[in-house]
DNA sequence: CATTGGTACCTTGTATTGCAAGATACTAAC
DNA sequence: GTTAGTATCTTGCAATACAAGGTACCAATG
């Protein structure tokens, strides 16, 4: 299970990434995240985040009818959202490089192998 | 630059990883993080974190004289800290897999290439 | 000897954000 | 008419990176 603190800062970018693939809505996004291996992201996380992203001008919403249940709120990226996504991708790569570099050193170290 | 929110949850594990390599102290840890590419992690981040890790029983400290400045507080991992590090490594891998999987899809998508 | 800069540590308060908990609404099936 | 699934929203809490400020010690500079 991925700890909640570890999701901070990456989850938002990942949601932008998912929306960039196709116009989609909250419920579907949470299913999508689950399929990608993020675990179950709760509604109390996803909906406040979508509202925040909308308020910040990264995504735009339109309501569409659903065959099942109440109206769906479909989101798409704004231009600002697209450039924010690009920024996220570059930041994530930076973090990823740093952590991988460190992990490699730790795993190569005698201390790790020999459990000293 | 790595956004602060993105460091949440990973930084703590990374500090455990650094301490696992050799007995070290706050100031040196922040230099180490910088070398690995995490950017400048501020003292207001590192020292409260070390106290937290100590309080939670993940690291142990002893004071040693320094040729320069006040006494250094050297840390080493406890058994609990070691198993916490192992947990971190597995959680990070999980997150990393999920994000990479998603990023790959986004970059392969027509929408990303054609900037639609 | 006073000052500056680098090392080394700590504390208080703030902003961000994932999530728990609870509420609402609509449809289909039993 | 009750349950289950889809779909959204709100309030408040917990965790944590960091800003801002402080203390202390030593070496070199002037």
Image: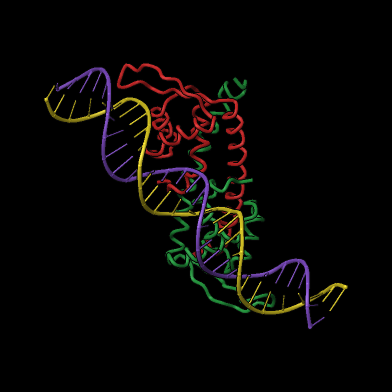
Chain colours: A red, B green, C purple, D yellow
Residue at horizontal 41%, vertical 29%? A26
Q: Establish if D6 lies above or below B4.
A: above
Q: How far across and down, in percent of the image, does residue A12 sit?
A: 50, 37
Question: Does residue A71 appear left or right of residue D26 in this picture?
Answer: left
Quadrant in which residue B45 is drawn? bottom right
x then y, percent, for residue D6: 32, 25
Residue D1 against residue A112 in the figure, above or below: above
Q: Quadrant of residue B57?
A: bottom left
Horizontal relation, residue A62 to residue A90: left or right: left
* Label total for image: 0
The location of residue D3, given as percent across then percent down, is 17, 30
Residue A113 can be seen, yes or no: no
Q: Nearer the viewer, residue A101 or A68?
A: A68
Asked whether the viewer can see residue B112, the reply is yes
Q: Is residue C30 left or right of residue B84?
A: left
Which residue: 48% across, 35% down? Answer: A52
The location of residue A107, given as percent across then percent down, is 55, 56
């Amino acid at each position: 299970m991925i700890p909640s603190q570890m999701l901070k800062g990456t989850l938002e970018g990942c949601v932008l990434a998912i929306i960039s693939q196709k116009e989609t809505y909250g419920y579907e996004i949470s299913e999508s995240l689950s399929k990608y291996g993020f675990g179950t992201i709760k509604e109390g996380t996803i909906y406040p985040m979508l509202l925040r992203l909308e308020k910040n001008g990264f995504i735009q919403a339109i309501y569409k009818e659903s065959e099942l249940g109440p109206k769906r709120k479909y989101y798409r990226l704004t231009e600002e959202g697209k450039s924010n996504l690009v920024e996220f991708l570059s930041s994530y790569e930076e973090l990823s490089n740093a952590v991988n570099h460190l992990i490699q050193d730790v795993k190569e170290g005698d201390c790790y192998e020999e459990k000293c």
